[in-house]
Amino acid sequence: MISVATTLLAFSMSACFMPFPGPSRFHHPPISFGGSFELGKHDVDLSGVNAELDRNNAGSFNSMNTTIGGSGYFILDRKLLIGGEGAGFWQSTSGTDARAKIQGGYGFLDLGLVPIYTENLLVYPMLGIGGGGARLSFRSRTGSDFYFGDEILYEYEEPGFGSFALNFAVGTEVRFKFFQSRTSMGGLSLSGRAGYIWLPVEASWSVYDFEIFGSPEATFAGPYAKLGIGFWSSERRRTGRP
């Protein structure tokens, strides 16, 4: 999912500098592009996973994860937002007998409305449709196997899961204009988003596509907030004879 975020970011950055068509007899609705690099915090319930780590004396994870990713969008007629975003997270822990690492990520297709659109400020609610997942790895200090749910896993076996997800969020963007031409303008942007990721379908930890019986809850659902810095470019509204 980190690669998804990188792709979205690269696309959105290039979109910011796409040339707009010159004046014509028939004017299409104004279009705005934007993209940003983002850092955030995502609260995920890892208590079940931590209980399994405790059984193996492998420490515990923090429920508050740091996320890194990016997003891009375009806005049609200053009203409809269509975009995409991706983010990844990871953390490590260690105990007396073993150490463990969890890494995951998610990506969404975003659809939103923009009730507040000015030259310097955007505010929009949005819905993201997509999915993500996580993977757990461990290394024993004594060469022993790892107890996870009702199973005993070898050290090279890494349980993981994937799931469909929905993202409910509200975003804002403050724009600073650095350039302007006859047809477009753009510059730097500072953005923020806060929301909740929900998994409508229950997921399960598995190894080699086989479900691990008795395993803890498999989820990356939870509230999050993130801040971003990026670029924007907007077509200037034109007036003229039809």
Image (cartoon, grey):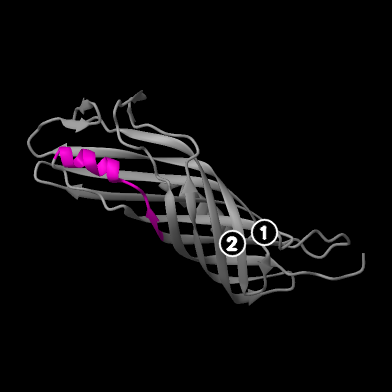
- Whether 62 is drawn above or below 24: the answer is above
Query: Residue drawn at (51%, 61%), measured in percent from left and top?
Result: 193
Residue 158 screen position, x and y as percent: 27, 33
Please report the bounds of the magenta region as a residue range.
Answer: 40-56
Circle 1 SS class: strand
Asked if the residue at tag 2 contacts the one at tag 1, i.e. Cβ–Cβ closer than 8 Å, the answer is yes
Query: Residue drawn at (46%, 60%), measured in percent from left and top?
Result: 37
Query: Residue drawn at (61%, 72%), measured in percent from left and top?
Result: 121
Q: Which residue is mark 2?
A: 34
Q: Is residue 47 magenta?
A: yes
Q: Is residue 45 magenta?
A: yes
- Whether 8 is drawn above or below 139: the answer is below
Q: CA distance from mark 1 to mark 2?
A: 9 Å
Q: Is residue 241 left or right of residue 210?
A: right
Query: Residue drawn at (66%, 74%), measured in percent from left and top?
Result: 119
Q: Is residue 161 left or right of residue 126?
A: left
Asked whether 20 or 168 is in front, the reply is 168
